[in-house]
Amino acid sequence: MTEPTDALSRYPAESGFAWPAEWKAHRRTWMCWPSRLECFGDPGRFLRGKHALAHLARTVAGVEPVTLAVRAEDAAEARLATAGKAEIVEMPLDDGWARDIGPTFLLGSENALAGVQWNFNAWGHKYQPYAHDAMFARHVMRAIGAREFAAPLVCEGGALHGDGEGTILITEQCLLNANRNPGLARADIEKILGLYLGARKVIWLQGRFSDLETDGHIDNIACFAAPGRVILGMPDLREHPDWEPVQDAMRTLSNSRDARGRRLEIIPLPQPGQRRLSWSGQLLQASYVNFYLANRAVIMPAFDDPHDDNARDLAGSLFPDRKVLQINALDLVQGGGGIHCMTQQEPAP
Amino acid sequence: MTEPTDALSRYPAESGFAWPAEWKAHRRTWMCWPSRLECFGDPGRFLRGKHALAHLARTVAGVEPVTLAVRAEDAAEARLATAGKAEIVEMPLDDGWARDIGPTFLLGSENALAGVQWNFNAWGHKYQPYAHDAMFARHVMRAIGAREFAAPLVCEGGALHGDGEGTILITEQCLLNANRNPGLARADIEKILGLYLGARKVIWLQGRFSDLETDGHIDNIACFAAPGRVILGMPDLREHPDWEPVQDAMRTLSNSRDARGRRLEIIPLPQPGQRRLSWSGQLLQASYVNFYLANRAVIMPAFDDPHDDNARDLAGSLFPDRKVLQINALDLVQGGGGIHCMTQQEPAP
C-alpha cells in the first residue's frame, strides 16, 4: 500500500478522523446535475431525470442546505429547475452521481473536517470519459477547505455503508471485483477502510446481485438504521434474481457482530412488488433501501408500486423523530441510481 | 418413555407413518364449535366468536369438506350458523380449538390413515375442565376409523409445524415449559417427535414470546411455505415484545439445515402495524402467520389493519396456485387463537 500523499503523511484514522453516520447532523448535502445523456438513453428521459433530480434537490433543501455542482453550460438550466433553493457551483463533471464521486467526509478533533477521495474508475470502466468525476471529490474538498486524503482503493461512496461506530458494510461483488481492485485481497481492503474511515469491523456480503451497473452497491441492498440495526431489502418473490444473494446476506448479517461486539438486528424492508425493465432492458434497480437521511428527515423513494406506502410507513416507524418525505424516483433510477446515489452529506462539525 | 399402548405396539414411524405437510391434499377440515365462554370473557364476545367461526367454516367449506364438532346442546345453533355447509357431529367438548386438541394425522403405506393423540392439559392447566378436550383426538380418530396412537408428550397441534419431509419447527417456550413436560429434555422430545411424526430434524426456536396463552405456539410465529422455505412473522417495531425473540428466531433459522440438509430460505411476513389489547388486557395475538392452507386455498386472517393487504399479497405470491381467501379474524383472536388454531386438516389418502 502506498503512503498517503497528503501534507502530514498520516492516515486519517491515525489523525483522529472517523466517518460519521449518515443520521448525524449535516452541514449540507452535495448533489450533481445529471450530465451524461448516455445514462438515460435519450434526451427525453435525460430531461425527466433532470426534473427528478431538481425535485429531489428542492425537497432536501427544505430540511438542509443543498449545494448543486453543475457544468458551466448547464448552470442556467439547473438554476431554473431548482428555483433558488439550491446553491449552484460550477464544476467540471462527466456524469453526476454525487454519492459515488463525492468525498466520504470525516470528522476529527476540534471540529476538523476532512474527506476521502476514492480512486474512481466509473464503476469498473463502464463509461468514458471519467477524468472530471475522478477529481470531483478533490474539487469539493478544496472548495470548502476540508483536509484531503486520497485512498489507494478503487471504490465509490455507494459501495459503503457505516454505522458511525466503526462498522462498515460492503459487498464482495463490488470491492473485490476484478474491474476495481484486482490486486487486493479482503484483508488489504479491510486495512484501507480501517486507516481511512476508522473501520474496526468490515462485514462482507457475498453473492452476486443483479445490479451490474454498480456491481452490487450496498446502498441498494442494505444499510444501517442505527448502530446494531440493519435494514435489508427483501425481494418479494423467489423468482427475483436477488432472492438468493439476499438470503445469503441475511445469514451473514445474522451471524455477524459489529465493531462493538453487538449482534445485529435485521429489519426486512419489502422491495417493490413490480419488476420493471429499464430503458436498456436491464432489471430496473428500484430499491427502497436507497433512501437518504437528511436533517430530521428520511427522503424515501416511491416507484408507483403497491409497496410504496409500506416503505414510507416502515421508515416512519424506524425513524420516529424524522419526517418521511417520499418522492417518486422512477425517472432517477432509469439513469442507473436513486436518491441515495444522487446525494452526499457533508457533516456538521 | 413408555411404550405405545396401541394394538400393534409399534411407533408410527416404525410402521411407515409420517406427518404430511399442511399443503398436501386434504380429505376434510375438522373444526369445533366454540364452547368455553370464559375464553371470550362475555356472552356478546362469545357470540361474535361463534359468528366468526361459522364464517370461517363456511369459507373453508367452499374448498373442501368441513366437519364441525359441537356439543349436543349447541348443535342447532351451529347448524343454523353454518347454513348447511358443514357436517355437524355431536361430541363432548370443553373448549374448541381443533388444531390443539384434534389428532395430528399421519399417512402410511397403502393409504392408511392414523393420528396422534397428544397428552392435552389445556396449555399447562390454564383452564378447567379439559377432560373432554383431552379425549377429542381419540373421538375423531374413532369416528373415522383412523389408527390411533397416543404420544407420551404434553403438546398441542398448534405447537408444531412440519415440512412433510421430516423437519419440525417448535419452540422451547412451549415444549420445554414446566407446565407441560417438566421431566423431558430436548433430546427426549426430539425422540418422541421422531417416533410419532417421523421427524428427523427438529428446529427449536428460543426466546420468550408474548403469547402466554399458548406459551409461544409456533403457529403464531413461523411456518413452512414449502420444504426449505420458512415464513417468519416480523413485528413492525422494535418496541414490540416479540421483537427480540423474532430476531433470535431469524438467527436460528438462518443457521439451521432441514432434515434433508437444505439451508432454509426465510420469508419475513410483516405483522400488523397496530397493537391492540385483548378484552382481558393482554397483547392481542393477531398474527398473519396463523393462516390455514386448505385445498387450493390460503385462508388468511385480516385484522382491520393497514398491513392486511400486504399479508394477502404475500400469500398470493408465495402460493401462486392457490386462491387467497382473507377473512376477518379479530373476533376469533379475542378468544385466544386464530384461523389456524381453529382448524385441523385430515389428509387425503
Image (cartoon, coloured by chain):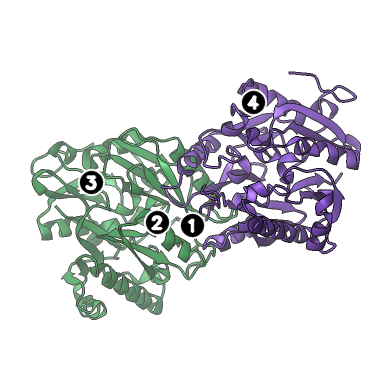
Chain colours: A purple, B green
Residue B317, numbered circle: 2
Asked if labels 2 and 1 touch by Cβ distance under 8 angstroms, the answer is yes
Residue matched to label 1: A273
Q: In the picture provided, is A80 more to the left or to the right than A272? A: right
**How many other residues sit within 10 Å of disc 2, few (<14), some (14-19) or many (≥20)?**
some
Residue B19, numbered circle: 3
Percent position (x, y) of residue B94?
27, 65
Give, as a three-letter code, the residue at label 4. Answer: Asn
Secondary element at image label 1: loop
Q: Nearer the viewer, mark 4 or mark 1?
A: 4
Q: Residue at x 56, y 39 (%)?
A: A212
Residue A181, numbered circle: 4
Q: Nearer the viewer, residue B192 or A345?
A: A345
- In the picture, which quadrant includes the C terminus of chain A? top right
Task: Give a yes or no on whether discs 4 and 1 share a subunit.
Answer: yes
- In the picture, which quadrant includes the N terminus of chain A? top right
Task: Give a yes or no on whether discs 1 and 2 share a subunit.
Answer: no
Q: Chain of mark 4?
A: A
